[in-house]
Image (cartoon, rainbow, N blue to C red):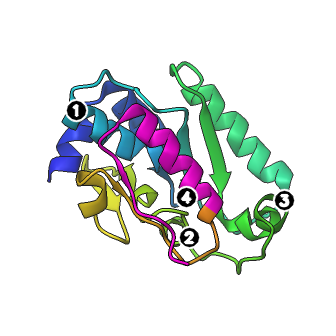
């Protein structure tokens, strides 16, 4: 699979994936920009990390939904990945429904897994994640497929009203990769 070869060829992503595997975070992935931007950099010959503002680490732990528990994981991940040349943003997907209304202005039901969270991303293109498994294989999650990513097309995901986020991220991507097509949000 092309995306797997591209991820495996990126030493920074592989380092992060290996360290996360060693940490054994429940249901963890590296998601979104670190994956699709790495693919776009590979396809366009741009230097590694071009356009990557952070590495999103998602995990799912519904055993303790307190901020303090999530903060402890954030600090542990930072201790393992703090040497990377881009910041790492770690979020417990089991807690998303607790802070989502304040950040985005509307409520969402609790999630049941990290993979399920991808279905709520503002753009289908961004809904891609990877995890390194103990046997060395990569698990890829892409609920909307990979066609948009490989076509440089940012397609809205109407699952939530994230039109502003879709537009902002699309414009940011287009400023780095001019060939990106931003599919407008349906009215």
Separation (CA) of disc 1 from disc 4: 22 Å
- Residue at image location 47% in from the left, 51% down from the top: 31
Q: Which residue lies furthest to the left in this view?
A: 1
Task: Check residue 66 in the rendering and tell me which mark sits there, or answer none.
Answer: 3
Separation (CA) of disc 3 from disc 4: 29 Å
The mark that comes first in sequence, 3 or 4, is 3
Dividing the picture into quarters, in which one does residue 154 lie?
bottom left
Depth check, front residue: 141 or 149: 149
Q: How crowded is mark 3: few (under 14 residues within 10 Å), some or many (20 or more)?
A: few
Disc 3 is placed on an element classified as loop
Marks 1, 3: nearer the viewer: 1
- What residue is disc 1 on? 44
The mark that comes first in sequence, 2 or 1, is 1
Marks 2, 4: nearer the viewer: 4
Disc 4 is placed on an element classified as helix
Confirm whether the magenta stretch covers residue 175: yes
- The residue segment tinted magenta is 164-187
Residue 23 shows in this picture: no
Residue 133 picture location, percent across and down: 33, 52
Separation (CA) of disc 1 from disc 3: 42 Å
Task: Check residue 120 in the rendering and tell me which mark sits there, or answer none.
Answer: 2
The mark that comes first in sequence, 2 or 3, is 3
- Residue at image location 78% in from the left, 44% down from the top: 71
Separation (CA) of disc 2 from disc 1: 28 Å
Residue 46 picture location, percent across and down: 28, 25
Q: Residues within 10 Å of mark 4 (few under 14, many from 20)?
A: many
User: In the drawing, does residue 149 fall left or right of residue 71?
Assistant: left
The answer to whether the residues at label 1 and label 4 have Cβ atoms under 8 Å apart is no
- What residue is disc 4 on? 166
Q: Residues within 10 Å of mark 2 (few under 14, many from 20)?
A: some
Marks 2, 1: nearer the viewer: 1
């Amino acid at each position: 699979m092309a995306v797997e070869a591209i991820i495996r060829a990126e030493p920074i992503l592989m380092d992060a994936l290996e360290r996360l595997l060693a940490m054994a975070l429940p249901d963890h992935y590296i998601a979104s920009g670190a994956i699709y931007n790495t693919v776009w950099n590979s396809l366009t010959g741009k230097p590694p990390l071009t356009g990557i503002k952070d590495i999103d680490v998602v995990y799912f732990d519904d055993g303790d939904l307190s901020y303090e528990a999530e903060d402890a994981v954030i600090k542990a991940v930072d201790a393992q990945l703090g040497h990377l040349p881009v910041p790492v943003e770690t979020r417990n997907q089991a807690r998303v429904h607790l802070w989502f209304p304040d950040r985005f202005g509307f409520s969402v039901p609790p999630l049941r897994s990290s993979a399920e969270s991808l279905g709520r991303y503002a753009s289908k293109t961004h809904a891609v994640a990877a995890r390194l498994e103990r046997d060395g294989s990569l698990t890829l999650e892409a609920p909307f497929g990979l066609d948009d990513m490989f076509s440089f097309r940012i397609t809205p995901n109407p699952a939530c009203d994230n039109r502003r986020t879709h537009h902002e991220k699309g414009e940011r991507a287009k400023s780095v990769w001019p060939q990106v097509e931003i599919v407008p949000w349906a009215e």
